[in-house]
Amino acid sequence: MEAPQYVTFDKDLTSIVKGFAVIFMMLLHCYCPDNYDVLLDYRYALVDTIRSSFKICVGIFVFLVGYGYAFSKTKDLHYSLQHIKKLLIPFWTILFIFTLPFCFDAFINKGFKIAVFNLFGIDSCFNYYSWFVYFYIYAMCVMPFVSKFIDKNPKGNTIIVIVLASFLMVVVHEIPRCLSFIDIIIPETVDNKPHLALFNCLMMTPLMVLGYLFAKQDYYERIKLTSISRCTTIVVCPLVVVACLVMKHLTSFLWNAFVDLFYAPLIIGAIVVFFNKFKCPHFRKTMAKIGEVSVYMWFFHALYYTKAVRWFYQQAITIFHDINLVVLWAIVLTFFVSWLIKSLVDSVNKSLFS
């Protein structure tokens, strides 16, 4: 009798999931007509009507933050600072080398406060998709405490954290309105950058701690591969991903952070099961390589659409008129540029700190 085999979710598979997530992100942004300064041909756009569904990429990355934190050995401040540094290096590389030289006057004219906010993603006028920077810093600051609390009673305490974070999120959002009743006027949440950043962090906390719970409880690793046929896998796993994207589109009237609690784990699970069942060496290697440079791709592709610098960078991807070719070329170009930047940064880090 064949010994049962279970799912493994290792570093290689994490990179593969990140690869899918960053491609979803680029499909979300690259198909948006409002992001372009030139007219493009959208007649045969592949994902025009369901483009917003790919915002699931946010949920996937947030889930993985919590999931990955569960495997940290120390879960202390030193670990957090090291990982914050690992994120700031690619972000600041893109910001200081590829962004500011093309908008230096605008950067200086914004003033010191806005400049500092942009260094940590709190303000995004110099990188539209930099919100992940402040969220990751927040995650690394709170997870040493939250993880210890959850470890005492994984399921029950995760629910408590989710409820508490949701309550605090509502409180933070309503502070301006409540203060107005006693004639204290402060900007609305959407107009106050630090206030909005805190609100967003609290909004994403439930999905982050859900990822931590999944890792601690080995939910994916409990899936028995020997009980799933290859035929079932090749049909069901892609179908789950497509179904989640379609359902996300159909439930777009609901709150993204709420529905992603269901869709993100399902999509991740489908990808993990598929690549556990099938080797697909070339496809696997491609997606893993994309995942390895996903952070660089995240921040670099923002240059095509950030108003301060897109006058320069957008020309590189709009050499085609058909939107599908523009998107495909943007993904390919961003990958190779990101791979080159990461290789150079890693080489510099190795020579400085080895």
Image (tube, grey):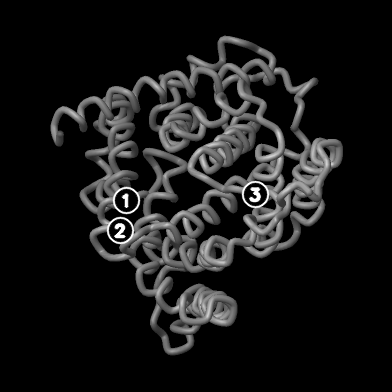
Q: Residue at x 70, y 33 (%)?
A: 278
Of callouts 2 and 3, the N-terminal one: 3
Alpha carbon separation for disc pair 2 and 3: 28 Å
Residue 83, above or below 38: below
**Contact between labelled residues 1 and 2, with CB atoms less than 8 Å apart:** yes
Q: Residue furthest top?
A: 319
Residue 80: mark in rendering: 2
Q: Residue at x 28, y 65 (%)?
A: 76
Q: What amino acid type should be assigned to the residue bearing mark 2?
A: Ser
Q: Is residue 46 left or right of residue 178?
A: right
Residue 227, above or below 195: above
Of callouts 1 and 3, the N-terminal one: 3
Alpha carbon separation for disc pair 1 and 3: 27 Å
232 or 318, which lies in front? Answer: 232
Q: For label 2, count other residues whose C-alpha is less than 10 Å away and answer few (under 14), some (14-19) or many (20+).
A: many
Q: Can the viewer see residue 214?
A: yes
318 or 307, which lies in front? Answer: 318
Alpha carbon separation for disc pair 2 and 1: 5 Å
Q: For label 3, count other residues whose C-alpha is less than 10 Å away and answer few (under 14), some (14-19) or many (20+).
A: many
Query: What SS does tag 2 mark?
Result: helix
Question: Residue tagged by mark 3?
Answer: 7
Query: What SS does tag 1 mark?
Result: helix
290 or 92, which lies in front? Answer: 290
Q: Position of residue 48 (x, y in %)?
A: 75, 32
Please tell me how many numbered marks the rendered image carries. 3
Question: Residue tagged by mark 1?
Answer: 83
Residue 11, above or below 71: above
Specify the quadrant of the image occupied by residue 320. top right
